[in-house]
Image (spheres, grey):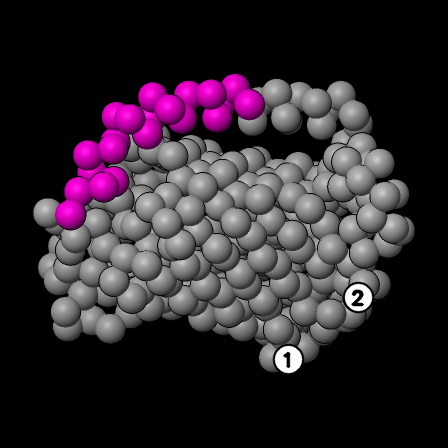
Amino acid sequence: MFVITHRSVAFSIATLLTVLSSTAWAQGSQSTSDVSTNQPANQSGIMAGDKDDADLVLAEPDFRVLNLPSTLRLPVRGSNFQLTHRFNGNLRQGSFEENAGNLFGLDQGAVVGFEYRFGVARHLQAIVYRTGLDKTFQFYGKYDAMRQGDSVPVSLSAFASVEGADNFQERYSPAVGVAVSRMVADRLAVYATPVWVHNTAESLNIDRDTFFVGIGGRVRVSATVYLVGEVAPRAGGYSPDKPAFGFAIEKRAGGHLFQINFNNGQGTTFGQLARGGFADSLYLGFNLARKFF
């Protein structure tokens, strides 16, 4: 497991506080569009026909659910930066007092990931992601083929990726999949994400594949606060230990989204999710995203 030093943790927290300090201005600049009741169809993102991909979708504010992709579109030449952070402290080990003494994992280092995505063409995103877990780089493209509307019951995105450990030098795992979502007004989004991943047992010198079906959901409980959950049960192939799962609470503020999450593993790429989580494990983490459009 890749461990970040206390200095890196402090730097990440300082970065988080710096970004959050700007949310008041960002939230104020978008307050009209966030709270307007005159255009609910535009905000929910389920109006028929082509719409501006930069419009706010209240039921789907981010490009991830927790670790799995959402069906949110990215406008051409728009971009999004995301920081993923999974602390190393297992909250299901030790007493509450012991975990509190370690600041619930903050004192035990973390696995940090950085993602950048860019709208290279209409409905087409290019993404690069690097996580400290096995020093993995992931490159993938996502095509947002369908958007839910009056005559289309669901949104659908197709994606293909390849990832490699040790800074993309070994243990390559290509993956293909689709994300299907259904939004209910501007309050609820549910997801089904079947994914096939090749070479999931390479670390054991075994040639195996894994097919899993991610199930997730996001419910808006107030104007800008959401509850989120997902699970990725394996439907076939290599499936060690337990399926990966996680749950979270998140806050949207203008173009920022901050999510505090709990997962039974620290994997965030398709290959890592295919290998699953761990029994008797729960890790505190967060996702921090910023849109640039």
The N terminus lies in quadrant = top right
Q: Position of residue 118 (x, y in %)?
A: 37, 38
Of residue 184 and residue 159, the one placed in the foreground of this image is: 184
Name the residue rendered at 11%, 59% in the picture.
49
Image vertical order of residue 111 relative to residue 65, above or below: above
User: Where are the magenta residues, as a range?
Assistant: 17-37
Image vertical order of residue 284 relative to residue 199, above or below: above
Q: Position of residue 283 (x, y in %)?
A: 72, 50
Q: For residue 221, say whether it is visible.
A: yes
Name the residue rendered at 71%, 58% in the picture.
264
Which amino acid does the dot numbered 1 rest on? Gly
Q: Position of residue 142 (x, y in %)?
A: 39, 53
Which amino acid does the dot numbered 2 rest on? Ala
Please state which of the two labelled residues, at mark 1 or mark 2, is closer to the viewer: 2
Q: Quadrant of residue 80?
A: top left
**Is 34 a magenta residue?**
yes
- The residue under label 1 is 236
Furthest residue toward bottom: 236
Q: Quadrant of residue 36?
A: top left
